[in-house]
Amino acid sequence: MVLVDIFKAIWTYWPLLSGTIIVLYIYQDHKTQFQLHQIQTKTALDPDAPKSITYSPSRQCNFRCGFCFHPATNSTMPISEAQKGLRLLRAAGMQKLNIAGGEPFLHPRFLAQLLIYSKEHLHLDCVSILSNGSKIPEYFLERYGKYIDILAISCDSFIKETNEVIRCGDDGDKHVEQLFRVAGWCRRYGVRFKLNTVVNAYNWSEDMVAHITELELFRWEVFPCLSGEGENENETRVRDASKFLVSDEQWNTFCERHKHLECFVPQDHRNMAGSYLLLDEEMCFLDKGTGG
Ligand code: SF4
């Protein structure tokens, strides 16, 4: 009998009840939006807010570039821990996230979860990925392209032999073929496509104009090869970048040859110190000093 009475009451007062539920829902939503707005307003005014973060969830990579800064074979942390770290960074003012490595596409499930979380829960302005391109399948961009603002691929040469020297034995031809495939998929699925090139002792004299034009990049970032103390500065390290370094003259020659390209953006590391923060696989900040 009691149950019947309860159903009767719900039936009678349903319009009133549903109205109250809707009002409560709208109130909660506004409260959440207001809290988020408060965080954003506060951090936007804070000059020390960590606005742009480059996060390396893992140092694992299938390439072996001679000047690599982060050669190692560890794995990613649990996704819940990574999400928690990103949530704290968002609250502290993060607006842009760049997911790098190692090679992020060696962990596609983890990567997909990071992308969805960054866009759907953290509402980041810009989410980008830095990859060597070799492990990107089309299905990934088709399914998760809507969560990626920019896909950056590292490519240091369009010449098979040069690639093989830089990559220490990887098949140079396959890399360039895959690069063009990925560029096509990015166009198809609405992801902005960017290239990163490290100018080094083996590629500084290369003319890349034709290939770069064909790729229809929105941005081509070019960096001089660096060595970092404690990372790759000599033969005692896992990688020795010393034989890849370029002189100022070689760097300038490369820049002169390509500077007429609209997408060309030379990145002198001395101007980059302090413009972004590096986060390693343990979610610890790295000291990139003046050059890393
Ligand atoms: S592709 Fe990048 S992470 Fe992989 S070895 Fe080369 S520089 Fe290192």
Image: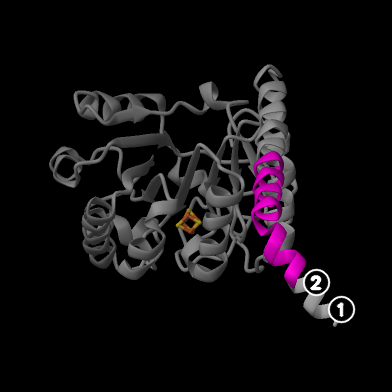
How far apart, in angstroms, are the residues tagged by discs 1 and 2?
6 Å
User: 239 or 156, which lies in front?
Assistant: 156
Q: Which mark is residue 65?
A: none
Most common secondary structure along the magenta stretch: helix
**Residue range highlighted in magenta:** 8-28
Looking at the rendered structure, the secondary structure element under dot 2 is helix
Residue bearing the label numbered 2: 6
227 left or right, relative to 250: right
Residue bearing the label numbered 1: 2
Is residue 9 a member of the stretch shown in magenta? yes
Q: Position of residue 24 (x, y in %)?
A: 72, 45
The residue that appears at 46% across and 26% down in the rendered structure is 268
Q: Is mark 2 within 8 Å of ligand 1?
A: no
Please report contact status of discs 1 and 2: CB closer than 8 Å, yes or no: yes
Looking at the rendered structure, the secondary structure element under dot 1 is helix
Q: Residues within 10 Å of mark 1 (few under 14, many from 20)?
A: few
* Residue 85 seen in the figure: yes
* Residue 286 seen in the figure: no
Q: Position of residue 75 (x, y in %)?
A: 65, 69
Q: Position of residue 226 (x, y in %)?
A: 51, 38
- Tell me the quadrant of the picture where the C terminus can be found: top right
Q: Position of residue 56 (x, y in %)?
A: 60, 53
Is residue 40 a member of the stretch shown in magenta? no
In the rendered image, the residue lying farthest to the bottom is 1
